[in-house]
Image: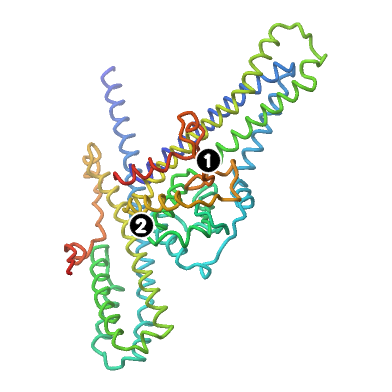
Amino acid sequence: MNIYSAISANKNKTWLIMVLFVLVITTVVYVFSNALGYGLGFVGIALVLAGIMSIGSYYYSDKIVLATSGAKPIKKSDNPELFRTVENLCIGDGLPIPKIYIIDDPSPNAFATGRDPQHAIVCVTSGILPLLDKSELEGVIAHELSHIRNFDIRLMGIVAVLVGFIAILANLFMTQLWWGGIGGDREDRNNNLQIIFLIIGIVLAILSPVVATLIQLAVSRKRELLADASGVLLTRYPEALASALEKISKDPHSLKSASNATAHLFIVNPFKGKNTKQMFTSLFDTHPPIAERIKILRSM
Amino acid sequence: MNSTLILLAVVLIIGAFTWYLYNSIIVAKMRVSEALSQIDVQLKRRTDLIPNLVATVKGYAKHEKELFEKVTEARASLVSAKGPAEKAEANNKLSQTLKSIFAVAEAYPDLKASQNFMELQEEISDTENKIAYARQFYNSIVLNYNAKLKVFPNMLFAKILNFQEAEFFGTTDEEKKPVKVSF
């Protein structure tokens, strides 16, 4: 698969996921509004709100992420070596040079964000710079640039918004239900259909955020593996990324400014020490197990 | 009546396919020339650095005249080179002569210690890395374009439409040699 066909495949997938989520959201809203006895107008309002939120986050998700993680932009004179590494790899990948940010934190990590290659940002923690040698840093940056080149940053940004929206809807429904939905005397409470919708609504309200999150995490894990592979295609040196991942995972520091909402962005899960090895919890992981990633890289 | 309809359909399908193919090959071809211009940007940066380097080294090592001439000559041939293969060769020659400049610099401690020289040396080695990456990108794009011309059934149309394969930006003979390690 060459660069350009990988990009178009990912763009198609983005569309597919967006259509799927819109369908899911419409269904959820429809069931909720029926259960609560609201009219179709509620569906319309909810969808318009969803649209505004999606567009807003499409343009602002990167700024929000940077602000919450406390990242600061740097100039070339601040760290010429890092800048040159990014520049060189961008040339090799045919990408415009992204903005470079640094998070002042001893925990070694890195992430990429933005909505497309023209508005992309690569961010590393100050802890990663002394830890890795030149070729290892190159491996990590190439991984992040692959997220940019493959349009993963856009895909993951949109998925995060949609998952968040489903969670908000479910919350809204449950509070409505609690504070007056059932007790509401707008409609005849003995309406059988409404009771059925009510039951489905409650089940959906509980399950849909979980399912949406699971989808998000599955997408995220796939993206990480793809970025590992296409990053290596750029540097032609899998061992460098493998040993970088090894070093990063052995470091005991947790990244303070990371949150559950941003964890999936980083090259390695920023929460250390919470690594559980049971089958079930691996469904909730943002990243594939590091040991597995290293094994794949070493077999390349 | 029926057979003319079928004939018309066949002509239409072939026409549509040719249209699609032509456009996709043109896009691939434009990517090749864009990738080549990326190399040119870096080559230009390199040739711009050289007069500076020569001037700096001259300040400390006046009698290395022959060397300066060689470098200036290699630089001129890179500036005037046309096409990827020729440029690659001129670039290699320049690399060789630059190597000898840096080797000569070893004999002049004042030169080696000068801030200006150190910065130039760093800039030049950075440009060399960038040329290498630009070359990697260019060659992958050329590979994609050439493959597009060669697969079936594209090859039939590519011949009729008179598309030529693109040249790779070659590796140096030196790079092709096995690496010698001596203990």
- Identify the residue at image location x=31%, y=93%: B62
Farthest residue in the bottom direction? B63
Q: Amino acid at mark 2?
A: Ala
Front residue of this view, candidates A106 and B174: A106
Q: Circle 1 — which element?
A: loop
Asked which quadrant contains residue A279, the reply is top left
Q: Is residue B149 left or right of residue A19?
A: left
Q: Residue A7: x, y in percent?
A: 42, 43
The quarter of the rendered structure image containing the C terminus of chain B is bottom left
Q: Chain of mark 1?
A: A
Q: Circle 2 — which element?
A: helix
Give me the disc on residue B35. 2
Q: Residue B119: x, y in percent?
A: 42, 78
Front residue of this view, candidates B168 and A3: A3
Q: Is residue A77 left or right of residue B78?
A: right
Residue ID for mark 1 = A274
